[in-house]
Amino acid sequence: MTLRVRIAVALAVLAGLAAVVVAFTAFVTTDQRVRAEVDSYLDSYGQRFQDRDGRDAGALCGRRGPNQNPGGPRIGDDGVEGVAFQCISPAGVAVASVGSVALPVDAEDQVLARSGGGVRTRTVQVDSHTYRVQTVALPAGGAVQIARDYGESQRVLDGLRWWLLLVAAATAALGAGAGWLIARRATEPLVQLTDAAEEVATTGRLDVPIPVSGNDEPGRLGRAFATMLGALGRSREQQQQLVQDAGHELRTPLTSLRTNVETLQRYESLPEETRRSILNDLEAETRELGALVDELVQLATDTYDDEPEQLVALDQLVERATERVRRRTGREILTNISSCSVIGRPRDLARAVSNLLENAAKFSDAPAPIEITLAAGVVTVRDHGPGVPLADRAHIFERFYRSAGARALPGSGLGLAIVEQTAVSHGGSIRVEDADGGGAAFVLSLPTVAPSDGGLI
């Protein structure tokens, strides 16, 4: 059963139930009202027979035989159509009547006739006619039955019952039709969205147009789906671009490796100095190729590894990274580090700081020192090199981007891209500025937290 059908059926059931409840309430209320009106009419007669002097009762019952009305009683002269009277003796026997209806007398009526007080009202059937009968006990003994034709009221109520049932059925049908229209209109965006999702699944295309309209839940879902497809499309484009750029960058070291290996294979008696130079070149190219593969893996997976986030003493991490770069490059690195802590992945953060230091060492010559400062979660790495031209600052953190002055230097153009990725994943940012006195200053900003007693890395 489709969603449209379920909504239509649910609305039809709800409309039908509501109509049935309203119809039942209206019928019961009308029935009670009609009965109350008839009973009130009977009560007005019954009170006339309960007077202490018994004149009305005597006028009706005192001088008549069964079912005879010679001269007619004064109480019946009002000529009300559909009203009948019957007298019951103290012994519980019907002795006189006004009208052509012989009303039934049961045990309870006989008890009232003997008691000398009390009233009883009920509905009876006489010769396929319905009457509302009130039995009134007379103070001097005996009782009078007052009957009013209730058939007309019953016929009105029966007609009302069928009319209300028809209204309930029509309401349920209208509810089903309205439910179908509402469900069709409400689910149309969902159907369109489902068709688009099936087309994406079938064709693999991520540029399928997504219908987006309104601010309701289907509209929000459509916008979210369109945003998701857009993000997937951009991710696919970035992956394709990454693969293309990676293939381009890998060709250079692989070509150099293949050339050196072919030279060693072809010329077995190379001079020792040439052989050593080729081997050194192979070692450098292999190291650069390994670093490039590591950077590609990190960028492609958007993480260094599955290392969880934890509380990190950023000052200690920066000091260790500085010492490693100092040993590796032999450069003088001046430090000004203040204590602070962040939440993050230690290896990613250490890689980002190392990349900034190695980038500074690459683009500044000794003996000019490299300077690194840390204060309130802001890591600043300053060099005394030529700086970063304004034209390059908009692209310097892009993957594989290398400025004209950097193309002759070793590297893949991924180091600063990794720094930006790490900064963004930790809720921070990275920017480059002109340093006072010349050179460039890379500023890595990270949100800090209050350190705890333990667990610092």
Image (spheres, rainbow, N blue to C red):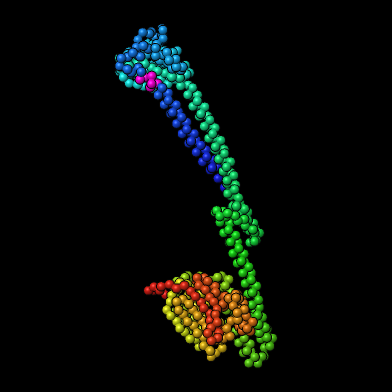
| Drawn side of residue 76 relative to residue 193, left or right | left
Range covered by the magenta-colored residues: 42-47
* Residue 419 in the image, given as x and y percentages of width and height: 54, 76
Q: Reply above or below: 307 against 47.
A: below
Q: Is residue 292 visible?
A: no
In which quarter of the view is residue 271 placed?
A: bottom right
The furthest residue to the right: 266
The magenta stretch spans residue 44: yes
Give the answer, above or below, for where 88 lies relative to 424.
above
- Looking at the image, which residue is at 52% across and 71% down? 424
* In the foreground, 287 or 350: 350
Residue 220 in view in this figure: yes
Residue 87: quadrant of the picture: top left
Q: Residue at x 60, y 52 (%)?
A: 189
Front-most of residues 241 and 70? 70
Quadrant including the N terminus: top right
Residue at image coords 55%, 42%: 9
Q: Position of residue 226 (x, y in %)?
A: 60, 60
Query: Looking at the image, how many numbered discs can be counted on the residues?
Result: 0
As drawn, is 242 to the left or to the right of 349?
right
Q: Is 355 inside the magenta-drawn segment?
A: no
Question: Which residue shows up at 47% across the image and 72% down it?
Answer: 447
Using the image, determine if residue 341 lies above or below residue 278. above
- Asked where in the image residue 225 lies, by quadrant, the reply is bottom right
How far across and how far down the image is residue 360, in percent? 55, 83
Which quarter of the rendered picture does the C terminus lie within?
bottom left
Q: Position of residue 136 (x, y in %)?
A: 35, 19
Magenta stretch: dominant secondary structure: helix
The relative height of residue 133 versus residue 422 in the rendered view (above or below) is above
